[in-house]
Amino acid sequence: MTDILNAVIVILNFIIIPGVAYGSQLALGALGVTLVYGILRFSNFAHGDTMSFGTMVVIFATWGLQSLGVSLGPLPTALLALPIGIAGCALLLVFTDRSVYRFYRAQKASPVILVIVSMGVMFVMNGVTRFIIGVNDIRFADGERFIVRARDFRDWSGLDEGLAFRTSQAITIVVAIIAVALLFWFLNRTRTGKSMRAFSDNEDLALLSGINPERVVMVTWMIVAALATTAGVLYGLDKSYKAFTYFQLLLPIFAAAIVGGLGSPIGAIVGGFVIAFAEIALTYPLKKVLGYLLPESLEPDGLVQLLTTDYKFAVSFGILIIVLLFKPTGIMKGKAL
Amino acid sequence: MTLTLRDMSLFVLVAILIIGTGYFQGVNTALTLLNFGLVSAIMSLGVNLQWGFAGLFNIGVMGFVALGGLAAVLIGMPPTTEAIAEGGARMAMAMTMGAVTIVAAVVAYRKLEPGRSRSLAVAGIIIVGFVIYRQLFDPARDAIEAVNPAGTGFLGGFGAEGLTMLIAWPAGGLIAAGAAWIIGKTALGLRSDYLAIATLGIAEIIIAILKAEDWLSRGVKNVVGIPRPVSYEVNLQADPAFLERAQGLGLDPVFASALQVRVEWAVLFSIVLILLLVLAQLALNSPWGRMMRAIRDNETAAEAMGKDVTARHLQIFILGSAILGMAGAMMTTLDSQLTPAAYQPLRFTFLIWVMVIVGGSGNNFGAVLGGFVIWFLWIQVEPASQVLLSVLTSPLADGSALKDHLLDAAPHMRLITMGLVLLIMLRFFPRGLIPER
């Protein structure tokens, strides 16, 4: 019995909790990608760098608040700085839209052109972020690090395995739930949200019913800024902030959005968790778990790690390809433009 | 060959820029810039083949370039005899087993009736095959990596030297073409932005393989001292005939040897570039090239005319990737080292895309011009912004935090510049410096 409990704790500690946290971060990122795709109808390659930029603003605001002596006690100060980051990121995105994307929208340029344009935006945003904050590894989480410590848990339960639950993971889950609830409330209950969905469903019909496209686009960018900054800050609190890791997040985020079905918000969330769990489960060495569950004679010698962590990209990619080949519209049936 | 006076003058301008570099920063700097510019131009030709001719949105350039680099290692490095004796045969068996598993799974998927039994059979083949593969692979890898891990720890290569090292270039093309065939078979049916994400992912996976598989490429321990097809500076400096010639020209022997080596590279690279350019030009103006453009412009119409769109896409995807692989092998021989961690998508994928878009997609001369122009900017923006920033920050006191930060940040200006160049070109000259005709 204790063996089974130990195995459960190992799975919980190394797969479930990190998976839920990482999945929430990916889901928030994928929601941003999917919204841009649904409303503006292109795959935004600058999304990773948008996240990076928003997080950078939050980091500066956090430092500012810290120097003023403001803190949230056990919670990281970055949560207080989040609205400032969202505002900064929204300003950047609205400015980018005005100066870059609007021109192509007016021209009714093909989505491929917009994707290439977003590559240019990606270069600029990446450069600006690196220019301002540099390329160093930055940890900006303060406050209490753990809710449950591994050692405390061991003492309390008397099991061999410890269970650690970090504050950043709890915050990630709670904030993600709030953000998603707000987003769905907005999309389903408010007039602006409904006009966004109408615009996404059928642009011409939406225009005929008097929906102002420019307003819809602006609101979309602001929501995208909020989602991207939140996702970026949660990821940064959970791991650390580094300009180019955010760029690399683009791949799992896109995989999540596509696997879930581009253009479908629920799909983005499902996709985020599918990718996160697959990535963590396939690269986690199962030796410990099997050691507890199997009789001694069957215990494995090796690590029983299906793939080394170097191949975590391969997991997102593998799922992406399988879904695209067998169910091209994604799990939740997104739009096929 | 349809170059207008305007196109010619653009090429002349690039030449002047490079000569100017030689005048202000030294001949050797200019020649290094030229050599990398030549390699960039070849990469740009490869992307232009895929995007400009056929409209294939491949942003996995980095992966193919890195595979070319692997070819340089496999051809050039001396074989690690002991490691091959320890684990070579087992590794070959493991690889065969892996290939057999995949082939068996594909055959089972094709031949069996769709349904649950097929899914189970395919899954069964993959799981059993994977377990056997790991049973063979793990001990073989450990045996190979255990042999002198600090010095070798990998299988090594064929140990080519001197001019035979040139084989590495087509070999790089071949490896990249093989990878492109596998990738094309699975991913080419996807629509453009899905293909983009898929190729982006594949490139990351290829880099992950190079980083993780120490037995193949030494992973992050890097391979250094890859032999090169041109002379070595030290050998030249020890060669009395060379010293005499240098003296005759009134040149310092160290400088003269560096110069000679760079000129040799430039000649070799130029031959490859001109050859590829001629071939690409012939292809573009052939019925095949016209068919490709017809497919690009309207797939449905081309299909209705009886063209096999999927096969043509696969064909040009392989050709373009082969060029990228070749350029990758050339670059790795030029660097004479393979450092997998140095492969960043911004530098090796997106920068090449900027070259093609700025130069003019669909026009081979445009792609080549873009390769030179963008490489020149990539190299020169950094010192230029250093100067600019030091002028701008001169009112600030020395040692002030802001000034130091700004001066340190100068290298990142090149990313901003590249982005702005791309955005400005797309907005005002969407067809590039030398548009398609």
Image (tube, rainbow, N blue to C red):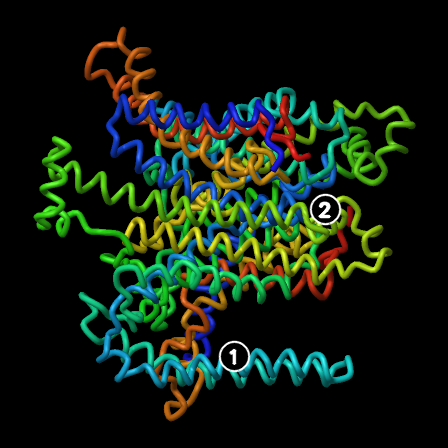
Q: Amino acid at mark 1?
A: Ala
* Residue A328 visible from this viewpoint: yes
Q: Residue at x 42, y 73 (%)?
A: A305
Q: Residue at x 36, y 85 (%)?
A: B90
- Mark 1 Cα within 10 Å, few/some/many (few <14, many 20+)? some
> Residue tagged by mark 2?
B293
Q: Quadrant of residue A203?
A: top right
Q: Amino acid at mark 2?
A: Arg
SS category of the residue bearing label 2: helix
Q: Quadrant of residue B186?
A: bottom right
> Residue tagged by mark 1?
B99
- Mark 2 Cα within 10 Å, few/some/many (few <14, many 20+)? some
Q: Position of residue A284 (x, y in %)?
A: 43, 68
Q: Chain of mark 2?
A: B
Can you say whether A255 is above or below A232 in the image? below
Can you say whether A112 is above or below B390 in the image? below
